[in-house]
Amino acid sequence: MQHSTEQIWALATALDAKLVEMRRVLHRHPELSGEEVWTTAQLKTWLAEAGIDILPLPLKTGLVAEIRGSQPGPIVALRTDIDALPVLEETGLDFASQIPGKMHACGHDFHMATILGAALILKQMESQIAGTVRLLFQPAEETAQGARELIAAGAMNGVQAVFGLHNKPDLPAGHVGVKSGPLMAATDAITIDVLGKGGHAAIPDATIDPVVAGSAIVMALQTAVSRVISPLDSAVVTIASFQAGTAYNVIPPGARLLGTVRTFRPEVRETVLATIERVVREVAAGYRAEGRLVVDQGTPAVNNDPAMADLMRRSAAALGLPVDEAIPTMGGEDFAEYQQLAPGCFVWMGTGCAENWHHPRFMVDESVIHKGAALFASTALMALAELQA
């Protein structure tokens, strides 16, 4: 079925004030990952009031809903995250967080309002839809657990394309950042244990010093990327925590290092992790210590399907929204989990604000919400039509 860009834009514009108020209600009531009970209930209320069906999936928090067209067809999913952060808000806004120490400091309230807006638009156009638009309101993005929970509950069953967004403070308000291929990195956590032999700090020859060995490992890992990975690829290895010892005059028996590895391509991910394992083992051995590596593999890279990215570019252009080439980031996003099951595209929505994600004075430009709603309604309809064809 054909749909009218003018109709979508008119519906989005008419919803502007309502979507801003929804966003403010959500902003006042932030909830941390896995604790989004109030948020889930509020979303269910709004969706039910609009006559949108909520699927009976076994989820503690978060929800999945559907808008079914008047004719059968493919299933396209729109995803938003719903959790907040343990941040004390300092914006001074009239609708600032009412829960001390918790804040929507990453803009997930903006994301929810945007996808709610798309849902309200699509509901009003359901007689023109051939197929189903599935709405994924996902918990626990900040802990990278929520996407897997929704997938395990069946949220992606039958889905043929999936779309999502994240606000981008350094992108001009209303601009859409789109990129084919890798946009956000695979995220792996590493734990390095260095096992030595403790003793008196004044008699180091009677010990095997894990602090020295661990320090050497940290320095050796600085070349794990620059001398192993092609300059045309990107990777980050960061050791962010070094834990050892409790006294100034005691050499401890062991040390623990914690870090993160960020990569875009699976082959690079494999090479970097293998290199780290070798460096840990062999450098530690050079200092008579034992090095052990444990890798906690996180989400894969957000990798936008070229056809879906092109569809989003065309959808934005048809609405008159400026389209920019998105700049990749080494940050991670569990939207990537959905892309393992269906082709999809994750985009930046410019919000033109001074402070970046996770800052206590983080804000978004609310004038962008209805524009994002129009974009995702249009994208869903375009994807359904093209998949049907």
Image (spheres, rainbow, N blue to C red):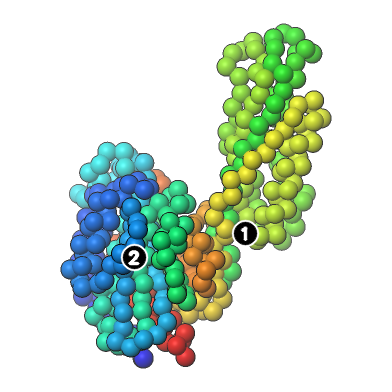
Mark 1 closeness class: few <14, some 14–19, many ≥20 residues within 10 Å: many
With 375 as the anchor, is 331 left or right in this view? Answer: right
As drawn, the label of residue 64 is 2
Q: Position of residue 361 (x, y in %)?
A: 34, 46
Report the mark closest to the observer, 1 or 2: 2
Q: Residue at x 38, y 48 (%)?
A: 33
Residue at 73% across, 57% down: 231
Q: Is residue 177 above or below residue 4?
A: above
Amino acid type, callout 1? Phe
Q: Earlier in the sequence, mark 1 or mark 2?
A: 2
Check disc 2 and give the amino acid type.
Val
Depth check: 143 or 56 in front?
56
Sort mark 2 into few (<14), some (14-19) or many (20+) by Cα contacts within 10 Å: many
**Residue 14 coordinates in the image, percent (x, y):** 21, 75
Q: Quadrant of residue 10?
A: bottom left
On-image quarter of the N terminus: bottom left
